[in-house]
Image (cartoon, rainbow, N blue to C red):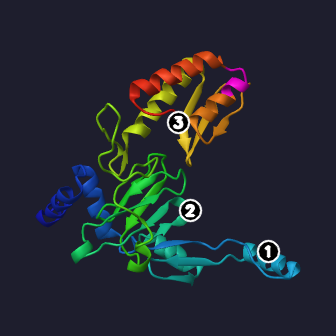
């Protein structure tokens, strides 16, 4: 590994805080993938129009002879299947294998401005940072970050790092009687204290009363997954609503659940959620 490459790695570590191995990987990606910001894929086999027969015929035609596209942050073109495959070999991202996150990197007055984008699988927020990279959301969805988005569209994005779960801007938060405390779910996904406390409380209650189940957030909702085939999975907009469903199913005692929930929320200095 030459001295020039080493210096590029060191420069990246100084900017991003990445570990040496991750910085080496991302520097190599930049050198070996000239089409890193390009995403390619197959157009959906759908059609529209006022004539249902013509629409159905067009959809069938697209299913038999699919169209392909290649796009960047500023343009998109139809391409052939051969061009699609060649671009992937040259480093383009196949949209079926990951998410392309596009942001804008400002210079001058707004050079400190950065953005966050939601994972298209779990809807958690991902901070774009300031450097092109390849990584994965904590849900496992792989993604790339490229800085080729037209400035006009960047102004509609969520700015700065934010809580991966609730989207609160990454800064000090008032916590009644306690100290603000953020943690990192990953290098690019911070989590605020209230969301961290909610996760801890939810897991503690489920572990105590439903030992064969798991609880997690998914797309802004709470999800209870039962490993007991006799019980179905549950979904709810709040954890309190999820507890109500658990009581209605007679899977746990209402008084015990309510007492534990109330005590844990009070100890964590957060409101019931």
Which region shows up in magenta?
A: 246-251
Kindly state the secondary structure of the residue where label 3 is placed: loop
Crowding at dot 2, Cα within 10 Å, few <14 / some 14-19 / many 20+, comes out as few
Q: Indicate which disc, 2 or 3, sits on the residue closer to the N terminus.
A: 2
**Residue 211 in view:** no
On screen, 150 above or below 246?
below
On screen, 102 above or below 246?
below
Q: Is residue 249 magenta?
A: yes
**Label 1, on which residue?**
60
- Alpha-carbon span between mark 1 and mark 3: 48 Å
Identified at 50% across, 60% down, the residue is 98
Identified at 41% across, 38% down, the residue is 194
Label annotation for residue 96: 2
**Residue 92 in view:** yes
Q: Is residue 119 magenta?
A: no
Task: Tell me the quarter of the image containing the N terminus.
Answer: bottom left
- Alpha-carbon span between mark 2 and mark 3: 35 Å
Residue positioned most to the front: 176
Look at the numbered discs 2 and 3 and tell me whether their residues touch, using CB distance below 8 Å. Answer: no
On screen, 235 above or below 91?
above
**Residue 127 horizontal/vertical position (percent):** 37, 57
Q: Indicate which disc, 2 or 1, sits on the residue closer to the N terminus.
A: 1
**Label 3, on which residue?**
273
Quarter where residue 57 is shown: bottom right
Disc nearest the viewer among 1 and 3: 3
Crowding at dot 3, Cα within 10 Å, few <14 / some 14-19 / many 20+, comes out as some
Q: Indicate which disc, 1 or 3, sits on the residue closer to the N terminus.
A: 1
Out of 213 and 238, give the one closest to the viewer: 238
């Amino acid at each position: 590994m030459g001295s020039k490459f080493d210096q590029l790695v060191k420069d990246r570590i100084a900017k991003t805080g990445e570990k040496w191995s991750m910085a080496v990987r991302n520097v190599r990606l930049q050198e070996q993938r000239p089409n890193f910001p390009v995403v390619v894929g197959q157009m959906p086999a759908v059609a529209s129009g006022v004539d249902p027969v013509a629409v159905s015929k067009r959809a069938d035609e697209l299913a038999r002879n699919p169209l392909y596209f290649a796009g960047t942050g500023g343009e998109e073109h139809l391409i052939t299947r051969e061009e699609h495959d060649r671009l992937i070999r040259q480093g383009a991202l196949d949209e079926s294998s990951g998410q392309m996150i596009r942001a804008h990197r400002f210079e001058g007055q707004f050079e400190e401005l950065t953005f966050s984008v939601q994972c298209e699988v779990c809807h958690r927020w991902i901070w774009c940072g300031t450097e092109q990279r390849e990584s994965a959301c904590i849900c496992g969805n792989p993604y790339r970050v490229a800085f080729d988005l037209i400035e006009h569209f960047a102004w509609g994005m969520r700015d700065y790092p934010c809580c991966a779960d609730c989207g609160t801007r990454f800064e000090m938060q008032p916590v009644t009687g306690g100290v603000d405390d953020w943690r990192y779910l990953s290098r690019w996904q911070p989590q605020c204290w209230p969301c961290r406390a909610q996760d801890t409380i939810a897991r503690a209650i489920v572990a105590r009363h439903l030992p064969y189940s798991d609880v997690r957030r998914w797309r802004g909702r709470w999800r209870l997954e039962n490993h007991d085939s006799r019980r179905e999975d549950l979904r709810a907009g709040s954890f309190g609503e999820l507890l109500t469903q658990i009581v209605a199913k007679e899977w746990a005692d209402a008084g015990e659940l309510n007492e534990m929930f109330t005590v844990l929320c009070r100890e964590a200095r957060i409101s019931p959620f």
